[in-house]
Image (tube, grey):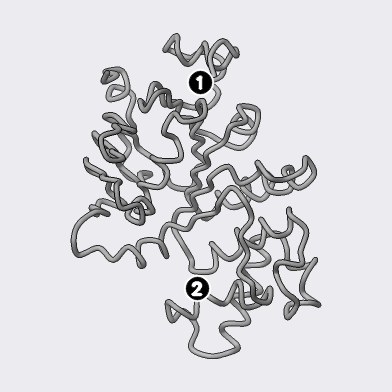
Amino acid sequence: MKDNNIEGRLLVDQRDLKFKARDVQVYYGDNHAIKDVSVDILDKTVTAFIGPSGCGKSTFLRCLNRMNDTIPICRVEGDIQLDGEDINAPEVDPVQLRARVGMVFQKPNPFPKSIYDNIAYGPRIHGLARNKAELDEIVEQSLRRGALWDEVKDRLQEPGTGLSGGQQQRLCIARAVATHPEVLLMDEPCSALDPIATAQVEELIDELRQNFSVVIVTHSMQQAARVSQKTAFFHLGNLVEYDDTDTIFTNPQDPRTESYITGRIG
């Protein structure tokens, strides 16, 4: 079912627009997983995707940097534009797209390399540093942006896998920002973390939106309310409602959204 009230509330100020998605469909073989999703994602804003397990929020998130390309049975239809450019056009290199649209996964996944090499890996591949001094600067700046520099600056040659869970996730965030992306996608980045580490990552997300568009998938409505300015509610593959976070949580327009917020579904 296509929800007609979505189009009416899509954003009209194109200057702040980062992603523009229209009528996106995703199929896994014969399974129609995402249905008619249209949404505008703003620059320098945290947008939260919420909804029950299996509702399509992570699937749609992976459309934004073409991670679904890696799944043979997955097919994506519709129009997704990043700064007005069709990201699914044949001439668009997915590797270059993922340098612009970084991703942080649910479980911290540092490379089996040193802390330094975890951060330096992307800039080396994309040729972002001309010499060791420039690479050192990128590593330090990225670790600072990941709120990790002061904790690891004296042990950069130690393995990233030796850090605590929360530190590993901040390392993965620092690794993602090292290629100077414009957008940062986060797929439940705190679900494997304890409350203290979660608070640190949430604080970091709030800082990152000064420079990036951040899109976060979360099972936690409390987290969405804390960190995001915009919230999209997915249910059964449909984007039911998308609005300012305060509006979604205090005055939702769709009864399905209200049922989810109040715990009657989900």
Q: Residue at x 35, y 44 (%)?
A: 17
Neighbour tally class for label 1: few under 14, some 14-19, many 20 plus, Cα within 10 Å: many
Residue 143 x %, y %: 66, 67
Residue 243 x %, y %: 44, 25
State the mark number for residue 122: 2
Hey, what amino acid is under mark 1? Answer: Ile
Residue 113 x %, y %: 64, 76
In the picture shown, does residue 226 fall above or below 182? above
Name the quarter where the N terminus is drawn.
top left
Q: Quadrant of residue 238?
A: top left
Tell me the CA gap for discs 2 and 1.
37 Å
Q: In terms of secondary structure, where does tag 1 sit?
A: helix
Q: Residue at x 77, y 40 (%)?
A: 195
Q: Which residue is mark 1?
A: 248
Q: Earlier in the sequence, mark 2 or mark 1?
A: 2
Q: Quadrant of residue 196?
A: top right
In the picture shown, does residue 255 fall above or below 142? above
Return the residue nearer the eye: 237 or 255: 237
Q: Is residue 136 left or right of residue 52?
A: right
